[in-house]
Structures are given as C-alpha cells and as structure tokens.
Image (cartoon, helix red, strand yellow):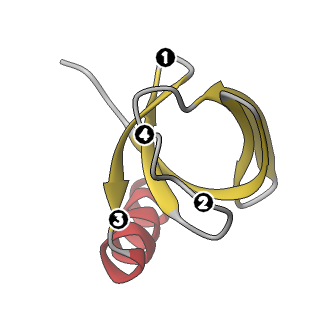
Amino acid sequence: MCLAIPMKIKQIKGEFAEVETGRLTRRINISMLPQAKVGDYCLVHAGFAIQKIDPQKAKETLRLIDEIR
C-alpha cells in the first residue's frame, strides 16, 4: 500500500517546491505537475508531487489523519 500526503506549496524554485503540512516542511520535486503554483495543495509521495488536490479535500484528509494519530 502506498500513502500520499496532502501538502501545501509554499515556495517554488524551478522543478522543486517547499511544501508544508502542520509543522512538517519538505523539499519535493514538482516536475510531474508543471501547472503547480504557490498556494496549491498536492499529494506528495516519495518526494514527488503526484497530483493537485482540492483544498477542501486536502484539509479533510489531514483532519482524518490527525484523528487516527
């Protein structure tokens, strides 16, 4: 089973972006999402943004993850 986490794009530099969720920040590759922009939510798996996601769905998913922790 694979798990992708919704994260918000805070900064973009070329093919890389700084993303965050809660207190966690990461530098990820966004080359598979050339349309990505600052403020977008994306699903992150293994250091890559693999899909843009609706902000409401991202927040709901993060809320559910927090519930099971």
Q: Nearer the viewer, mark 3 or mark 1?
A: 1
**Cβ atoms at labels 3 and 4 below 8 Å apart:** no
Callout 2 crowding tier (Cα within 10 Å): few <14, some 14–19, many ≥20? some
Secondary structure under the numbered disc 1 in the rendered image: loop
Q: Identify the residue under disc 2.
A: 37
Q: Amino acid at mark 1?
A: Ala
Q: Which mark is residue 2?
A: none
How far is the residue under mark 1 from the one under mark 4?
A: 15 Å
Q: Earlier in the sequence, mark 1 or mark 4?
A: 4
Q: Mark 4 — residue?
A: 33
Q: Residue at x 30, y 74 (%)?
A: 57
Marks 2 and 3, how far apart at CA: 21 Å
Q: Amino acid at mark 4?
A: Leu
Cα separation between marks 1 and 2: 20 Å
Query: 58 above or below 34?
Result: below
Separation (CA) of disc 3 from disc 4:
20 Å
Instruction: Mark 1 and mark 4 in contact? Answer it, CB < 8 Å.
Output: no
Is 57 in front, or is 36? 36
- Say the numbered circle drawn on residue 46: 1
**Residue at disc 4, secondary structure:** loop
Q: Which SS class for mark 3?
A: helix
